[in-house]
Amino acid sequence: MTLDFIQIYYDDTQKDRLYPFATPYKNDTLTDYFESKVISDLVPDLQGDLISVCSWRLAQKRGDTIINLNGDTSLTKEKILANEFDIAVLTPRSPRHQQLAMASMWHGQAWDDAFSVFKKFLKSDLSINVPDELKKAIYENHFIAKKEIYRDYVSGYLLPSMAFMQGEEVFKANSGYINKKKNSQEVKDYQEKSGRIDWPIAPFILERLFSIYCEGKGFKIINL
């Protein structure tokens, strides 16, 4: 098996936080879809048997989920290739975690309004019925998937969803994320670059789209 493991960064000071085996990708273009736009651009052309497109924060985020990794946050190319899976989740949550309910709690009315519209689109345009809750929480696009799975997700789910969101103002609503960011400099940098006061709700919906894609497909999913 071969591996394409990409880590996105935005500032040169973040490069020393990347894994040694990762391919760095500097993203200079900010869109409302954040790393989902990068994923949609890169994945169709990647040739590895296994593909991952993660943020520069992955090592930190793995530390945040250490309890669900059985205390082992190490990650190497050898460790990845030694396991058999369809999908490996790199920042796993508790099996009891309710991904959709928590989104409503975190983002409030912005989530409720936008996700209601999004679910109707998925059902009418893509024939996808979203359950009341998802069985496997996969966050932050921090996963590794077989090439054919990742490409199918991008072409069948991600690209149509971003195209739909483009014409709907409800997905531009403030997400409330500004109230959860602890780093004031990151808030200031985002506001200056985007011209917005707060992050839009769109990327937080797309962050859960891969979990929706996996629902009911019978993939072999492991925590790694």
Image (spheres, helix red, strand yellow):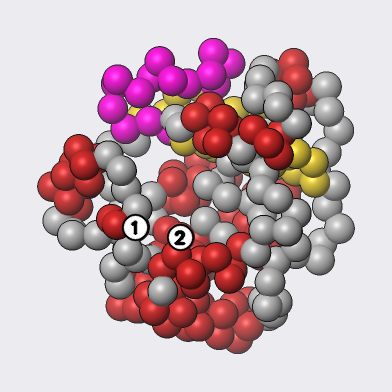
* Quadrant containing the N terminus in the rendered view: top right
- Residue type (three-letter) at the residue carrying disc 1: Tyr
**x 44%, y 20%: residue:** 17
Query: Where in the figure is residue 196, as x and y percent of width and height?
Result: 18, 59
Circle 2 packing at 10 Å, graded few (<14), some (14-19), many (20+), is many
For residue 130, which quarter of the picture? Answer: bottom right
Camera-side residue of 178 and 51: 178
Position of residue 161 in the picture relative to residue 75 (left or right): left
**x 43%, y 50%: residue:** 37
Circle 1 packing at 10 Å, graded few (<14), some (14-19), many (20+), is some
Query: Where in the figure is residue 78, as x and y percent of width and height?
Result: 74, 16
For residue 106, which quarter of the picture? Answer: bottom left
Which numbered disc covers residue 204?
Answer: 2
For residue 12, which quarter of the picture? Answer: top left
Say above or below: 142 vs 194: above
> Which stretch appears magenta?
8-22
**x 53%, y 27%: residue:** 59
